[in-house]
Image (cartoon, rainbow, N blue to C red):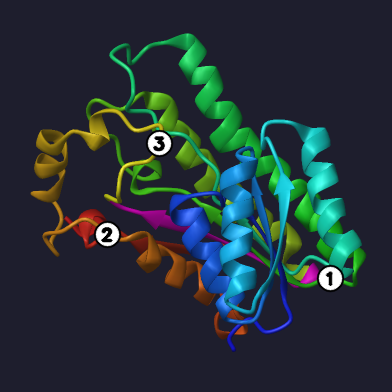
Amino acid sequence: MRVANKCALVTGAASGMGAATARLLAREGAKVAVADMLEAEGQAVVAQITAAGGTAIFVRLDVTEESQWEAAVGAVTGAWGRLDVLVNNAGISGSATNDLYDTALWDRIMAVNARGCFLGVKYAVAAMRGHGGGGSIINLSSISGVVGQPRIHSAYNASKAAVRLLTKSVAVQEGEARIRINSVHPGLMPPMRTSGATADPVFRAKMLEHVPLGRSGEVDEVAQAILFLASDESSYMTGSELHVDGGYLAC
């Protein structure tokens, strides 16, 4: 098993990419905290993991609230004694708007996607240092953190770019503590609950014209990249970017 006995916390794990990642990490031997605001859906993921013989708990977490981050990480270390892996997956889309200069939406997207990721890093680093150092943090950025796109609020691009550079900054700061931190950049994936334009078949078809592999990705394909970064197989990688985008950024 590739992450046997590691203790992991995955945010936004009640559905989609987060749920796929939580299930895969558990299948590969990790104890997994399924963190989300959606308790019923999160508990269902926990039930799936335990039914398959894995170990999981549900932790309620609004990633924008610092006190909830402190409690969530405390719940993991209280249950299992340590935190080895954090997957900062929780995020919201910027495509469900007709006003690309909506200030309130800017604030909301930045709060969830950028502040939420920063807070996760802050408390994960403290926990990892607290048990002697060492660990892996995986931040979910996006192709949108590298290039601009039409019909998407600029806050989404800005927030995902912030995640990208936050990752590199912390990689430099925490290398001595053997804490590795890398970013994953998914391309066109199945629509999120908060998707707008990116769920539109016409818009998606136009995006696919720029994807060399000619198809959208699957959440399990991103989960496999996250598993690699969580495992010791990536032990000499930190501050790196993994593009899981079908070649979109190569064009």
Mark 2, mark 3: which one is toward the viewer? 3
Q: Residue 251, position in %: x, y?
A: 16, 55
**Residue type highlighted by circle 2:** Gly
- The answer to whether 132 is drawn above or below residue 222 in the figure is below
Q: Residue 184, position in %: x, y?
A: 46, 58
- The magenta segment is 177-187
**Residue type highlighted by circle 3:** Arg
Regarding residue 18, the answer to whether it shows in the image is: yes
Q: Which residue is mark 2?
A: 217
Please tell me the numbered disc located at residue 133: 1
- The earlier-in-sequence mark between 2 and 1 is 1
Q: Which residue is mark 3?
A: 193
Position of 128 with respect to 172 (left or right) is right
Residue at mark 2 to residue at mark 3: CA–CA distance? 17 Å
Regarding residue 236, the answer to whether it shows in the image is: no
Q: Quadrant of residue 34?
A: bottom right
- Locate the N terminus and report the quarter of the image it occupies: bottom right
Q: Residues within 10 Å of mark 3 (few under 14, many from 20)?
A: few
Residue at mark 2 to residue at mark 1: CA–CA distance? 34 Å
Q: Residue 174, position in %: x, y?
A: 74, 62
Residue at mark 3 to residue at mark 1: CA–CA distance? 36 Å
**Callout 2 secondary element:** loop
- The earlier-in-sequence mark between 3 and 1 is 1
**Residue type highlighted by circle 1:** Gly
Which residue is nearer to you in this view: 185 or 84?
84
Q: Residue 237, position in %: x, y?
A: 56, 74
- The answer to whether 59 is drawn above or below residue 85 in the figure is above
- The earlier-in-sequence mark between 2 and 3 is 3
- The answer to whether 154 is drawn above or below residue 216 in the figure is above
Circles 3 and 1: CB atoms closer than 8 Å: no
Which residue is nearer to you in this view: 156 or 249?
156
The residue under the point 72% across, 76% down is: 6
